[in-house]
Image (tube, rainbow, N blue to C red):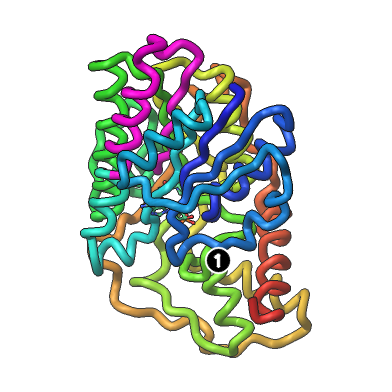
Amino acid sequence: MKNIMITGGAGFIGSSLVKFMIGKYPECNIVVYDKFTYAADKDNLKEFIHNKNFTIVEDDICKYQSVYDVICYFKIDTIIHLAAESHVDNSILSPGTFIKTNILGTYNLLEAARQAWEPDNFVGKRFHHVSTDEVYGSLSLLDEPFTETTSYDPRSPYSASKASSDHLVMAYYHTYGLPVTISNCSNNYGPNQHKEKLIPKTIKALIDGEQITVYGNGKNVRDWLFVVDHAFAIDDILHKGKIGETYNIGGNNEISNIEIISTIVSVYEEITGNKVRSDFIKFVEDRKGHDFRYAIDFSKLTNETQWRPTTDFKIGLKITIKYYIKKFTNND
Ligand code: NAD
């Protein structure tokens, strides 16, 4: 691993991964390839821009020639693919961009990597695709967590587009021998996330004195992983994972939406000393096709790489809440 391209590196998880990679592999060249959509933030990368081993390419993964040229010019040997449209609500409102970026964009990257790497018989190369647990569908409270052999059952345009991209990645492995790995991860939390997502959105509403809207009865359950633990997992898969395999990544922190909001409220009151309005939570009509529960069995990853999440949920959440209170209070 010498020259690493991280697509979507200006987004939430991507920027955390960039920080991890620059810290752990100072001898490697890191190239962020990102279109800088509304979800990206240049500030997420500002601490690295003077680093001589770090380059930002501002472009769209849907442009084949651009992607191919970047892979060849920078002699990229490792692609970690995170670029995507990532918000389920947006995918319900306008699925088209999800189909374009998440499916066609992934196809472009795969094809460019194949064309660039095939002459070397793919030696020393890796394409790692970052995906979601949402491809597996929805669980009831009594169901066993998702494993890597759980059938795909995506239920939103977002999860369907990610499922399609996962299938394309595997097709390139089976058909052309492209050296791929895939990870399917549960909900991430931590710094640098766009304010449209549940945790930053809740904190912004608290600061602005507004209500937070919650779908249905708020009892939908998600598993949460601290974003830095995700970076460790990807690194372990790159070094110890097997080519052609899929790995689930989870946080062992199943919690309902309403519980996470209540926790944020009490931490917010504790930190700021402000009393939160009693009608802070406003229940609204449920999201269309709202999955009830996601839960992840990540024992395959632990067995093969010894990875496990290390950030205590309460501590990670407190760090995250403090980060957003500071950010939003400074009107960032
Ligand atoms: P994000 O929305 O914060 O960031 C996405 C990044 O991709 C942005 O920087 C954006 O500019 C870039 N991008 C979007 N379209 C692009 C295009 N056409 N060309 C180039 N760049 C483009 O997303 P995130 O939450 O950091 O998620 C990153 C990846 O991880 C996604 O593939 C997502 O499906 C996956 N994932 C996210 C979570 C989560 O909880 N956030 C969980 C599991 C998997």
Residue 111 visible in rendering: yes
Q: Quadrant of the C terminus?
A: bottom right
Residue 37 is one of the magenta-drawn residues: no
The x, y position of residue 128, in whole percent, is: 45, 30
Residue beneath the point at 48% across and 53% down: 58
Residue closest to the eye, 295 or 52: 52
The region drawn magenta spans 105-132
The x, y position of residue 84, in whole percent, is: 38, 50
* Kind of residue at badge 1: Ile
Q: Is residue 255 above or below residue 94?
A: above
Residue 136 visible in rendering: no
The x, y position of residue 101, in whole percent, is: 31, 50
Q: Is residue 198 above or below residue 105?
A: below
The x, y position of residue 220, in whole percent, is: 40, 60
Residue beneath the point at 49% across and 68% down: 258
Q: Quadrant of the N terminus?
A: top right
**Residue placed under numbered mark 1 in the picture:** 199
Q: Is residue 312 left or right of residue 112?
A: right
Residue closest to the eye, 111 or 116: 116
**Callout 1 environment at 10 Å: few (<14), some (14 to 19), or many (20+)?**
many
